[in-house]
Amino acid sequence: MNRAVSSVRTRHLGSFCTSSSSPASEAWDGRFRLHKPRGQHLLTNPRVLDAIVRHAALRPGDAVLEVGPGTGNLTARLLASPVESVAAVEIDPRMVEAVTARAAALDLAQKLTVIHGDAVETDFPEFNVCVANIPYGISSPLIAKLLFGTYQFRTATLLLQKEFAQRLVAVPGDSEYNRLAANVRMVADVKLLMDVSKRDFVPMPRVDSSLVEIRPRAVMPDVDLTEWLAFTRECFGQKNKTLGAIFKQKRKILDLCKRSQRTERCTGGATGRGIILGVLDDGNDEACGDDDSSDRAAVLSEEEVGAFKEKIAGAFESTELAAKRPSKMSNDELLRLLRLFNEQGIRFQ
Ligand SMILES: C[S@@+](CC[C@H](N)C(=O)[O-])C[C@H]1O[C@@H](n2cnc3c(N)ncnc32)[C@H](O)[C@@H]1O
C-alpha cells in the first residue's frame, strides 16, 4: 500500500490553458502536464463546482472523503463548507503537492489530510460522506469498494461519465440495465442529480458527465452478499438469455457443480478483495474465474452431473423464473431464485 500524508507548501495556482503543442494524452495547465489516461480532467466551471457541494448537503461535523482532488478545485469548496474535515486520496504526487499548497493558501490546511495513493488499493480513513469528481477509469471498482467494503457512510455524491451514470440508475427492462445496476440497487438507492457538459473541464474530455447520489440502504438485505455477487455474475454474463437457457449450458453446469462441491474450501478465497472489486464490472464474463487448474481438470462422473442437473431443475420447478431474462428481472425475483438454488445445495461463490 502506498500511503504518505503530504507536507504543506504554499504556491501560486495559475489559471488553466491548453497547449496545441501538447501530446494528445496531455494538456498543459501552466505548471505541469495533465495526463488524460489518469483521468486528469479538471472541473473548472465554478457554478458546477458550487452545485456539487450544494447537492452533497454537507453538515457541520461531517468527515468528507474526496477521491482524486487534482489541484483542489472541489477540495477548496469542501474545505470552505461547515464540514469537520476532508481526507483526499490522490495518486499523482504533483497533485498532492498542489492541493496541499492550495489548502495552505486558503488557511484551511488544518481541515485537510491528503493521502498519496491509489484510491482502489488504499484503505480510506473513517468518513461519513464522499464527494468527488473521480477519474472515470476507476468508477466500477471504487463504487464496489465503497458499497461492498467495510465503510459506513451517509451518501456518496460522485461525478461520473454520463453513460456509466445512466447504467447505474437503470431499472429492469431498460436497455442499460446490467449487473452493476442490480448489485448497486441491492445495497443502495441511486439518484441522478444533474448532467455536466464536457466543456466544463480542462482539458475537455470526449464524454459528458452526470452527478449521482448513492445512498446506502439503512437496512441491508438478508443475503450473503458474496454469494449474491457471484450469482449475478453468472446471470448477467448473458443477460438477454433466459435463465433456463443460461443454466442449461454444459460448461456452466460443470463449473457450478465443482464450485458447489468445494464450497467449504473456496469460501475464504471467494470473499477476497479482488473478487469484490471486480464484481461490478459489466463485461460478458461467464464464470467466476477463481477456479484453479486442478479444479478445472477435476473429472465429474456422469452420475454427479446428472444429479446436479436435477438440482437445477428442482430449483426452477414450481416457479416461472426459467423463462425470464435477468435484464428484465427485479432483485426480489433474482433473490428468490438464488434462495431456491441454495436450498438445493447449489452454491455460486
Ligand atoms: C477528474 S480529475 C478530478 C480533479 C479534481 N477533483 C477536479 O474536479 O478538478 C481526477 C483526479 O484523480 C486522480 N487519480 C487518477 N487515478 C487515481 C487513483 N487510482 N487514485 C486516486 N487518484 C487518482 C488524478 O490524478 C486526478 O487528479
Image: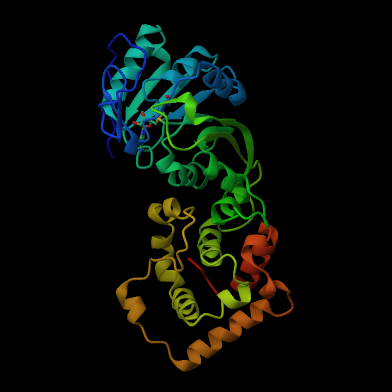
Residue 277 percent coordinates (x, y): 43, 50
In the rendered image, the vertical position of residue 185 relative to residue 328, given as above or below: above
Q: Nearer the viewer, residue 35 or 203?
A: 203
Taking the image as drawn, is residue 127 in sight? no
**Residue in front for this viewpoint, 24 or 275:** 24
Asked if residue 312 can be seen in this view, the reply is yes
Looking at the rendered image, the quarter that the N terminus falls into is: top left
The quadrant of the rendered image in which ligand 1 is seen is top left
| Residue at position x 35%, y 78% in the image | 296
| Residue drawn at 48 percent across, 47 percent down | 144
From this view, report whether residue 85 is shown above or below residue 41.
above
Percent of width and height locating residue 165: 56, 42
Residue 12 left/right relative to 284: left
- Please provide percent x and percent y for residue 311: 59, 82
Q: On the picture, is 85 further left or further right than 172?
A: left
Eyeballing the image, is 146 above or below 290? above
- Residue at the image position 28 percent from the left and 20 percent from the top: 97
The residue located at (49%, 16%) in the rendering is: 77
